[in-house]
């Protein structure tokens, strides 16, 4: 603590010295440009000129700091227009006085140039000081507080909602992708001192682990947490046969549809329907106040534009400078880190070039700053419930690894954001309970393609007797898997098939034309669908069409198990060496023994979803190393079963009831929703389902927007 205070105290003198140096340089440049502005000393040497500039810049800065506030206060009664004109003359006068205060009085300027020089120096000094304050969280907090207060006064908004002045508010802060073990390690190693303080010798919070569903990713988890249902979300992306479209959780249209389905399923607007705010999330949770909410991005209307949060944040020039400087620094940091990883020969490793440095900087800087600023505004406005998502760690861990030094540095910055919000809570008009949680973890490991030399799509096409891209054939590391697939196809079809040769598939290729399988990846979870069959295909149908496919997949060393429907035994789980277990008899032993507790129930639940794929593929998991093989280009992945990706956390104040009684377990995002909702009930009383319409109900945003659109399109009585 002492070290942190010393570092904070030491930044102010450093900023003063740097601003002084920049102002001196600015004065020297202006002296070289403006003919009637001189800084020559008695001997006309460069050294004396620089000394004169330094004295002049220092005197001008000191006069501006000491005299200017009194001048402004004395002129408060002057009309605004007159004061605006006087500012330039007064500033110029201060510069002339500063030049006279230099030791030899060598500086000189006519009044016109003095006004110009004073204006330029003031602007440069202000910009430099703001840029240097980007790391000063206290200055940042004060600036955001003033901005939020001005906006409240302009809007006439009450600081605290009527009827809830005595009840506490709740901030739910989601640390995207931070698993339970990662949090514990970060606390133990001192990387997250704020969280460590909450869990220290005199704890104020309790840490509760919870297990995700089979689909361990933000789309399923956050939908369940915010809306109480993630039914029929089998993965991050999946194919829906009746509509012929691919659903992707982080696309605005898909997110809006998923939210609509969840609301229809639960008949409840969501966790945040009563005086809530949703910031940086995939879904709104029924909140009235939105910023950077993906499910609302495709909608039109002033109140529903998800980009409004960016505009609100960047209207403050100081915010813009802070974030811009941090953005550039983060781009440089990523380039440096990826270069060092390449030089060291770190393994596993994925490509981090192209636009990725800018994508990372956006997630770790821009989105973080905008979301934190919005949450600060919500707390100072006294909103009852706020749910915000900080995605920085998840983005970096995908490309650098969940336990990498790069990801650890992100955790340190996230802890600073948590500390900042905790300080703001002390100044909010109502007390706040700060709840931290994650939506999933991440499991490390080399990619499937990196280990075996071919993608899951390549392997599926090989098992179907379809041509495989030549890049897979040329990859040496994929020879074993490729040869096994080729042998299986030859044996099953009773004829030679050269899967690497586009003409070698023969009749099989022609019969599959227009019906090639759609292969989608969600971390280490793969989904295979046959678009020309309207219903979910059975194992018997797949074997009849592609006799080698299921055998090729189940026996591949990079695959843990398959889920398919069987006409004879219902759905079954398939594994290597002909292993087969009906889902009805599935337990956490046998094929799923390494996948962790609750794996059988998670698979059984997903099997009931209407849009489960024809073949669900989960990669292998090595419990000794904790590694999986992602079917995407990620060395830290999540989306399926196996390892840390399924273990999230919930960190809640001790003033709230325990999430689960006794030694009970918290399983699934829908159960987490129930816990969070009970906590809100404790402070606010029950929220009202959509089916009821008392006057006191908080109208969901979808209903309100439709009503506003009708009012805008219908003619008013005056115009009729």
Image (cartoon, grey):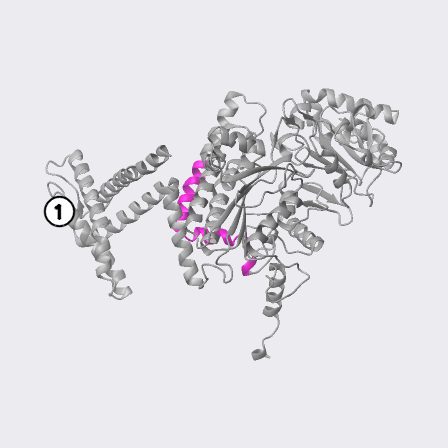
**Number of marks:** 1
> What residue is rendered at 50% in x and 42% in y?
362
Would residue 284 be found to the left or right of residue 365 on screen? right
Task: Indicate whether 298 appears above or below 49.
Answer: below
Q: Can see residue 473?
A: yes
Front in this rendered view, residue 545 or 134: 134
The quadrant in which the C terminus is found is bottom right
Residue 473 is situated, as x and y percent measured from the top left of the image, at: 71, 24
Q: Position of residue 173 (x, y in %)?
A: 53, 44
Instruction: Give above or below for 632 relative to 273.
Output: above
Measuring from the top left, give residue 292's x and y in whole percent. Answer: 54, 50
Q: Outermost residue toward the front?
A: 662
Of 156 and 665, the residue lying toward us? 665
Question: Is residue 352 something one can see in this rendering?
Answer: no
* Magenta-drawn stretch, dominant element (helix, strand or loop): helix
Front-most of residues 362 and 644: 644
Which of the image's four quarters has the N terminus? top left
Secondary structure of the residue carrying numbered label 1: helix
498, above or below 153, in the image: above
Q: Which residue is mark 1?
A: 100
**Residue neighbourhood size for the residue with mark 1, other residues' Cα within 10 Å, grouped as few (<14), some (14–19), many (≥20):** some
**Picture coordinates of residue 261, whole percent (x, y):** 70, 52
Residues drawn in magenta: 302-330
Snapshot quadrant of residue 136: top left
Residue 582 within the magenta-colored segment of the rendering: no
């Amino acid at each position: 603590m002492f070290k942190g205070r010393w570092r904070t105290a030491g930044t102010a003198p450093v900023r003063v010295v740097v601003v002084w140096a920049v102002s001196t340089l600015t004065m020297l440049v202006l002296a070289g440009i403006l003919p009637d502005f001189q800084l020559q000393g008695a001997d006309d040497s460069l050294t004396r000129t620089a000394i004169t500039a330094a004295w002049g810049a220092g005197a001008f800065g000191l006069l501006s700091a000491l005299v200017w506030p009194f001048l402004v206060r004395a002129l408060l009664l002057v009309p605004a227009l007159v004061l605006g004109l006087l500012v330039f003359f007064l500033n110029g006068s201060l510069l002339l006085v500063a030049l006279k205060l230099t030791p030899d009085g060598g500086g000189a300027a006519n009044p016109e140039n003095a006004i110009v020089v004073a204006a330029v120096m003031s602007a440069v000094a202000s910009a430099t000081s703001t840029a240097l304050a980007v790391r000063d969280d206290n200055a940042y907090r004060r600036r955001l507080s003033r901005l939020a207060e001005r906006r409240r006064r302009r809007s006439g908004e009450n600081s605290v909602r009527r009827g809830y002045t005595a009840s506490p508010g709740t901030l739910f802060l989601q640390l995207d992708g931070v698993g339970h073990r990662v949090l514990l390690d970060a606390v133990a190693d001192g990387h997250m001192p704020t969280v460590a303080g909450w869990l220290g010798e005199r704890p104020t919070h309790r840490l509760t682990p919870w297990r995700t569903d089979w689909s361990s990713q933000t789309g399923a988890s956050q939908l369940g947490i915010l809306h109480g249902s993630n039914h029929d979300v089998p993965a991050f992306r999946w194919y829906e046969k009746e509509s012929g479209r691919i659903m992707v959780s982080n696309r605005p249209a898909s997110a809006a549809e998923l939210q609509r389905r969840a609301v229809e399923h639960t008949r409840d607007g969501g966790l945040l329907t009563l005086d809530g705010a949703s910031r940086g999330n995939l879904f709104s949770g029924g909140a009235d106040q939105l910023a950077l909410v993906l499910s609302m991005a495709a909608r039109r209307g002033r109140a529903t534009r998800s980009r409004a949060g960016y505009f609100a944040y960047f209207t403050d020039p100081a915010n813009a400078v802070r974030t811009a400087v941090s953005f550039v620094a983060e781009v440089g940091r990523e380039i440096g880190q990826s270069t060092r990883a390449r030089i060291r020969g770190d393994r596993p490793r994925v490509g981090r070039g192209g636009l990725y440095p800018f994508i990372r900087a956006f997630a770790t800087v821009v989105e973080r700053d905008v979301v934190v600023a919005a949450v600060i505004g919500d707390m100072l406005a006294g909103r009852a419930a706020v749910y915000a998502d900080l995605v920085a760690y998840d983005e970096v861990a995908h490309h650098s690894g969940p336990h990498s030094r790069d990801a650890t540095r992100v955790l340190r910055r996230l802890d600073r954001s948590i500390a900042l919000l905790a300080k703001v809570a002390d100044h909010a008009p109502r007390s706040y309970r700060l709840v931290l949680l994650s939506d999933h973890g991440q499991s490390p490991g080399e990619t499937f393609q990196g280990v075996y030399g071919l993608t899951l799509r390549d392997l599926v096409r090989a098992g179907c007797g379809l041509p495989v891209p030549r890049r897979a054939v040329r990859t040496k590391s994929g020879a074993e898997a490729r040869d096994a697939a080729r042998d299986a196809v030859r044996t099953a079809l009773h004829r030679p098939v050269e899967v690497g040769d586009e003409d070698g598939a023969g009749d099989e290729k022609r019969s599959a034309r227009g019906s090639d399988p759609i292969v989608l990846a969600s971390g280490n979870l793969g989904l295979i669908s046959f678009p020309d069959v309207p219903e979910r295909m059975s194992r018997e149908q797949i074997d009849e069409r592609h006799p080698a496919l299921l055998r090729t997949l189940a026996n591949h060393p990079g695959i843990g198990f398959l889920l398919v429907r069987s006409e004879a035994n219902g759905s079954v789980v398939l594994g290597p060496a002909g292993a087969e277990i009906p889902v009805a008899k599935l337990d956490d032993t046998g094929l799923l023994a390494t996948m962790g507790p609750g794996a059988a129930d998670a698979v059984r639940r997903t099997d009931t979803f209407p849009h489960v794929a024809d073949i669900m593929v989960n990669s292998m998991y090595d419990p000794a190393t904790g590694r999986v093989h992602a079917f995407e280009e990620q060395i830290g992945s999540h989306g399926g079963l196996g390892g840390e990706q399924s273990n999230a956390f919930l960190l809640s104040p001790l003033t709230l009831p325990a999430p689960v009684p006794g030694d009970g377990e918290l399983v699934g995002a829908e159960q987490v929703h129930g816990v969070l909702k009970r906590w809100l009930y404790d402070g606010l009383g029950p929220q009202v389902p959509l089916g009821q319409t008392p006057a006191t109900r908080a109208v969901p945003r979808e209903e309100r927007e439709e009503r506003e659109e009708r009012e805008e399109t219908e003619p008013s009585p005056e115009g009729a």
